[in-house]
Image: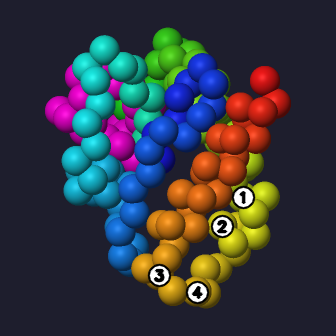
Amino acid sequence: MVVEQSSGRILATAFCAGHVHDFALFQKSRLWLSQQSRCVADAGYRGIKRWHGNSQTPHKKSKHHALTAEQKVQNKALSGQRMVVEHVLARLKVFRILSERYRNRRKRFSLRFNLLAAVCNHQLASSV
């Protein structure tokens, strides 16, 4: 899911059948992001720099090297910017179809998710 940082609008979604890692789904979706746009992703998107040069992911500590104080500050700032996406996810999970196990036809999940995203975008636009 691609969310606009300033307004919280949902811009794009991608789906596939079964369990697929987020970054693998991003690669398969072939979503084109402008190089001028800034992409803030979570730790699951390691290696996104090869696909989009203007992207940021949090620093990750290794078994032998702890994070420095500067890296911890950068991670905290990045997580603050990602809060917009987390709030959008919370807004979507108000609809129980997304917060619980999906028991309907899988072919229709993307349609229903996009309809709920449109409803959330409409509510956001009407509240401004």
Residue kind at label 3, given as amino acid type: Arg
Q: Where residue 38 sits: x, y (%)? A: 39, 20
The span from disc 3 to disc 1 (Cα, nearest Å) is 18 Å
Residue 36 appears anywhere in the view: yes
Within the image, what quadrant is residue 20 found in?
bottom left
Q: Earlier in the sequence, mark 4 or mark 2?
A: 2
Residue kind at label 4, given as amino acid type: Asn
Does the magenta run of residues contain 49? yes
Instruction: State if disc 2 and disc 3 touch (CB < 8 Å).
Output: no
Instruction: State if disc 1 and disc 2 touch (CB < 8 Å).
Output: yes
Residue carrying label 2: 98
Numbered mark located on residue 93 in the image: 1
Looking at this rendering, what residue extends furthest in the right direction?
Answer: 127
90 relative to 27 in the view: left or right: right
Secondary element type, mark 1: loop
Numbered mark located on residue 106 in the image: 3
- Bounds of the magenta span? 44-64
Residue kind at label 1, given as amino acid type: Lys
Q: Earlier in the sequence, mark 4 or mark 1?
A: 1
